[in-house]
Amino acid sequence: MNRWDNLKYQRIAKVRLKGNEYHIEFENGDAVDMPVDFAIPAHVRKFAMEDFTFNSFELIIPAEPFDIEIPWDKIRINSDVEFSRYMAQKAEEQAKGVGERIKLLREKKGLKSLELADRSGLTPQTISRIENGRTDVPYQTLQKILVSMGYDLSDLAGNLDEETDDRNMPSLLRRLAKSGIDAQFLRTKIWPATLHNALSQQRGVLPDMLLNEAASYLSNIFGWTSKEIWSGDDLIIRSKPAEMAFFKRPANSNLNQIKAYSHYAFRLGQLVLNASITEKKFEYPTNVTEFRKFLINHYGEINLDNVLEYAWDLGICVLPLSDSGIFHGAAWNINGKHVIVLKQNTQSHARWIFDLLHELYHVFAHLSEKNTSVVETEELSPFASQDTIEEREANSFANQVVFDGQAEALAQQCVAEAGNIENLKKTISKVSKQTNIREDFLSNYIAFRLNYQGENWWPTAQKLQVTEPNPFEVVKARLENRINLLKLNPIESNLLTTALN
Amino acid sequence: MRAIKGTNFNVYVYPEDHAPPHCHIRYKGQQAESLVGLPLLNLLAGPVPEKSILKTLQANTKRLMKLWEQLNPTSINQTEEQS
């Protein structure tokens, strides 16, 4: 509550004339000296400043042809800087509000600005200026615009009988974009193609059935009620998964976008856990050596299939995503159950395996806790400048599993034996055969290492990568074997299927 | 200047008043005034008016806006671009 909402702030207790000033006392004890010149408008010639009267909310000075009435807020605005600033801000908001409301009504009618200009007899520039919040628009101009769309001035205040319910797609899209959810993401990941096509083919007012369906997908992911979705207010992402455990906020990134995508990925993770038909078969390993030994003895060589199989057998679900953007993976503990999200744009199995092992470490690090969250906002690499101890440990875990604790020694051996960068590829293949460590792992590690030293060896390293079959498809196939979509409702099933396709 | 006389409230619009365009709702009894923006009927100061009062304002939006402009001519740019 602001102090100007208070009766005593508003009410005038006493007024007296003191030279050329009115000395006005308010009930809250404030006193204001208002020059007579300020009180009397310039065009008023005949007035009797001594014969003033006042009531609780105004000072009245007899004048011709009409008495001058000065309300409490006009007196206050010249003496209370905060109140004056507040009103200036409200004036700006109000003008913007009028513009937004006109735009909304125009869009509800499916009209373009040019069409509205044509209908109302105004220039497109005038329409644009008003929609952008011009402050000094005569009511006749507003009336002209509104009447040309079949509305009236009173429609600017909306429907007072209903809760604010703006079932309006352009407004929803704008508010979603503000929350980090852009139209392309909606089209490709949230709304199924059939719904999106139906929405885009409609012009003007959209049928309620379509709007309800569109809203139900958003509700399912972001937990917003239908009332919130259509309220016209900002859509806030109340995201536990995004709030917890950001290791780093990447420079120049849109925090809303990370939050929105993290929440989306988290919801998909929940759906995978709900749809999972897999049981935990083995106890969690207690250290990296045990993990590596069990992996090799039970599943065979270290490849994507085997690490995935082991993860699932530990009761850890693994979901692949392929969207671009700043989210690079996550490990969530949701009510004691674990889900890993992998998001890689490369086809390199070695990179996918590294990321999976890295996230597995995060799972193992938080086994004794419930509802923990790790969201990777940077691409993972063994040499990235990670901010936290846990990130460094996760990298170290992945390297130890892959290289059996010899990553650095093997890298140095390769560099020493090669003598120069041109021979590196051949040497890596040789060392790989001698040590039984895959050459894609070795070349990746060395490429990251050289990159760290300012050398770009990626084009050669890429030639040594295993890229077939497509790793996304490998992770997806494993997931599809371990879940039953019938355990989800149709909206949830659609969301997961869309994410995987 | 009183613009609307209700049963337990009156609505006032003042000349040479400050921005944004607004009216005052003065209630009978010991209650602070509500300052309500025109034409959106957004609350600027004071208590939230009852819906029935807002409906009265909404029904009189055109009259209130017209009165505001008559009493506050300098707040409005009377030149508009015709196409």
Image (cartoon, coloured by chain):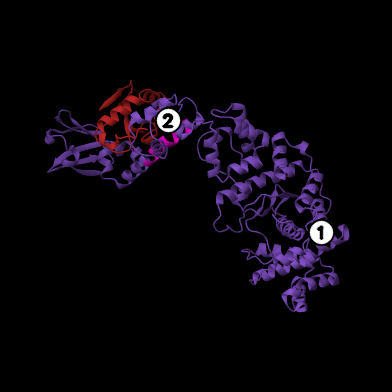
Chain colours: A purple, B red
Question: Which residue is nearer to you in this view: A253 or B82?
Answer: B82
Which residues lie in the magenta part?
A92-105
Q: Of marks 2 and 1, which one's residue comes earlier in the chain?
A: 2
Position of residue A78 measured from the top left corner of the image (x, y, whole percent)? 26, 44
Q: Specify the subunit that label 2 lies on.
A: A
Q: Say which amino acid is labelled 1.
A: Asn
Of all chains, the one bearing label 1 is: A
Q: Is residue A265 left or right of residue A158?
A: right
Name which quarter of the figure residue A391 lies in.
bottom right
Q: Amino acid at mark 2?
A: Asp
Residue A420 lies, with reference to residue A11, above or below; the image says: below
Determine crowd level at label 1: few under 14, some 14-19, many 20+ residues with C-alpha closer than 10 A: some
Q: Secondary structure at mark 2?
A: helix
Q: Is residue A315 visible?
A: no
Q: Which residue is mark 1?
A: A303
Q: Magenta stretch: dominant SS? A: helix
- Residue under circle 2? A118
* Nearer-the-camera pick, A79 or B13: B13
